Image (spheres, helix red, strand yellow):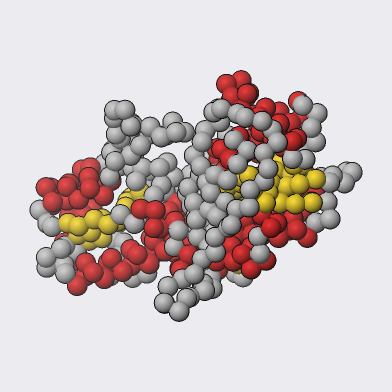
Amino acid sequence: MAKLRGKALVAQSGGPTTVINSSLCGVVQECIRSDEIEAVYGGHNGILGVLIEDIFDITKETKMTIEGLKRAPSAAAGSCRYKLKSLKESRREYQRIVDVFKAHNIRYFFYIGGNDSMDTADKVATIAGENDYELRVMGVPKTIDNDLAETDHTPGYGSEVKYLATTVMESGRDTEALYTFDAATVVEAMGRNAGWIAAGAAVAHRTEEDAPHLVYVPEIPFSFRKFVKDVKETYKRLGRVVILAAEGLQDGRGNYITEQTGDFAKDAFGHVQLGGVAETLKSIIEKEVGIKCRYNKPGTAQRNAMHFASLTDVNEAYLVGAQAVREAVAGGSGFMITLIRESDHPYQVSTGRANLSVVANGEKFLPRDFMNESGNHITEKCRRYVLPLIRGEAPVTIGPDGLPEYVRFKRYPVEKKAGEFKI
């Protein structure tokens, strides 16, 4: 494969994670090391920034800032949930992306994100080919949901689970102390269609006393009657109960038990907006079991908790970012970097790659054998899968005021060359 000289552009998409910037750091530092890549640009707010030509020069940032990305939460380049549809429906926008790349001699495109991002990257590669414009496109996996196909796990998941498991553990101690008054607690985990997060955080349950005592995931149809029975039995046995539930719980007909209706029922990607599982289960417990119940919703805090990130997660996020650049410089295009688990003891991973189109159209669900027969807690197989991903503490710089210090890009703007474009 002939060498390809030009600039690179990297962008981030979807919900931020604790380690998405570690992947960004891997991309940027590996690009800087490459003789073929002349400069590294960032798309401000993901693909949306490319469309409106809001791009900035990352190579003008200090080395300290770039290195500091490994210890900074959220998406330093700015993220988005802007939905590009099919090539037929959004061809004008895809063509615009290629036009912007041409105007700046961008020959390498790295998109850090989940399924929708991989779909966008795949279509950008397709239309670049139709324009006879040589562009190497690589996807870098990111999602706390751990539901990307073709990879053992995704960067962002380990840190999410490490933080949430600890939150559940500590919530359990609170309930244990006040069980004579607050006898039950429901903790709501993110997870629309897949229960990876709820199941992963359940590793906090190391003894019968430890929370969570009950765990519910979207893959197993939720029965209100069985739920009440589970709670009553646990309360009778322990005198208290802590429940960990994924936000996307569904009934036997596949309907979300908290599905919203009306004008704001769907987000920009067409995904159904969910109400509060925690509130719903709290009401059921108080009405049907007759005990006082509280609920906790960590919300977005759980996906940006850099102060308690998994070192394994940080390192692997960097790895997939750097590997994406190496693959592209070597001639690869149209792939997402994957993580392959080589062994659990000792834990070892290697990288592979999967076609963007396969990842975009796939979804990885929690295996049934990761949950017990009753469908209300995890198995040892799930525990063995999760534990290596949450090990190690990532270093964070603490300022003189006792709080973490996180870097922020200066975002040196790149001159616009592609003309005006209205979205």
Seen from this angle, which residue lies furthest bottom?
A: 400
- Residue positioned 67% across, 66% down in the render: 63
Quarter of the figure with the N terminus = top right
User: How many numbered marks have been drawn onto this rendered protein structure?
Assistant: 0
347 to 197, vertically: above or below: below
Where is residue 386 drawn, in percent x and y?
Answer: 49, 61
Figure quadrant of residue 89:
top right
265 to 61, vertically: above or below: above
- Residue positioned 67% across, 27% down in the render: 95
- Residue positioned 60% across, 34% down in the render: 51
Figure quadrant of residue 207:
bottom left
Q: Is residue 324 visible?
A: no
- Residue positioned 40% across, 58% down in the render: 302
- Nearest the viewer among 56 and 235 is 56
201 to 110, vertically: above or below: below
Where is residue 185 drawn, in percent x and y?
Answer: 23, 59
Where is residue 136 drawn, in percent x and y?
Answer: 75, 41
- Nearest the viewer among 248 and 46 is 46
Where is residue 355 drawn, in percent x and y?
Answer: 68, 39
Q: Is residue 92 visible?
A: yes
Quarter of the figure with the C terminus = top right
Is residue 35 toward the left or the right of residue 321 in the image?
Answer: right
- Nearest the viewer among 397 and 266 is 397
Seen from this angle, which residue lies furthest front?
A: 415
Is residue 90 toward the left or the right of residue 390 in the image?
Answer: right
